[in-house]
Amino acid sequence: MRRHRNTWLAVLATLVLVSWQAQAAQAATGVPDRSRHCAVGMPAMRAGQAGTGAHFAKPSRISCFGSFAESVSYATAGRVRLAPDARSVSTRQLQAAGVVSTPSALASQPLVGIEYEDSNYGGDSLVLYGSSGSGCYSGTWYGFPNLSSLGFDNRISSARTYSNCLGRHHDGTSYTGSYRYCDGSCSTFGTMNDRTSSIKFF
């Protein structure tokens, strides 16, 4: 009886989380063109998959909202709650909520980066998280090979990275062409502004 009860509780907890994210995604319909903040996850890849991972890994369904706060809340499964008009989130807030990995505390479904349309972290945003893994440790990496499919091609002008990840922003799809690194915070991409077509976090 106890085994059945524990199994039922585990199933119920999973259904609650799935239902919460489904409701949040449903609320994202009808987002006005003037404000678009999206979130999408990608499974973790291992170092040995560097040559094939980009072709087999598929992102989770992208979900878009009318505010930055809503997209962050969705990407973190409700663990980070910001003021409705928030335009940024601090690393301290993310660490306190357990949604970014550190050497002493690994997170599940970790945030790996936030990309912004404008310099100095303004404009529309794209919150990127790992749908598996615990960040960029021990050779683990995350790839977003085609930003056009996410509605963010040639739009990035600033970014932040998390969970021990270094973000390499390429001007070609599938991590090709010229690139610029972002480690931590990049308030502008200089000559790479509005040129990123793919990103690899490692």
Image (tube, rainbow, N blue to C red):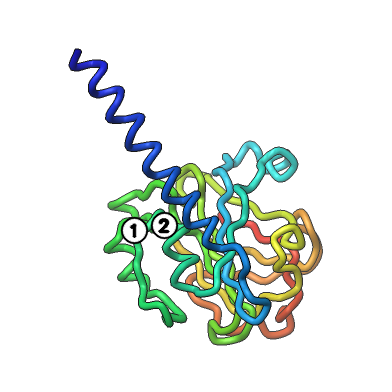
Local packing at callout 2 (Cα closer than 10 Å; few below 14, some 14-19, many 20+) is: many
Compute the Cα span from label 2 to label 1.
5 Å
Residue extending furthest toward the top: 1
Q: Is residue 164 visible?
A: no
Residue 123, placed above or below residue 197: below
The image quadrant of residue 180 is bottom right
* Residue for point 73% across, 65% down: 170
Local packing at callout 1 (Cα closer than 10 Å; few below 14, some 14-19, many 20+) is: some
Marks 2 & 1, CB-CB < 8 Å contact: yes
Instruction: Assign the N terminus to one quadrant of the image.
Output: top left
- Say which element carries label 2: loop
Left or right placement of residue 169 versus residue 39 in this view: right
Residue 14, placed above or below residue 182: above
Residue 64, placed above or below residue 86: above
| Depth order, front residue of 159/18 | 18
- Say which element carries label 1: loop
* Residue type pointed to by label 1: Arg
- Say which residue label 2 marks: 76
Q: How many marks?
A: 2
* Residue for point 35% across, 49% down: 106
Residue 44 percent across, percent down from the top left: 55, 43
Instruction: Assign the C terminus to one quadrant of the image.
Output: bottom right
Give residue 171's mark: none
* Residue type pointed to by label 2: Thr
- Say which residue label 1 marks: 79
Q: Is residue 29 visible?
A: yes
Residue 193 percent across, percent down from the top left: 71, 81
| Depth order, front residue of 5/133 | 5
* Residue for point 67% across, 66% down: 169
Left or right placement of residue 136 versus residue 147 in this view: left
* Residue for point 45% across, 63% down: 162
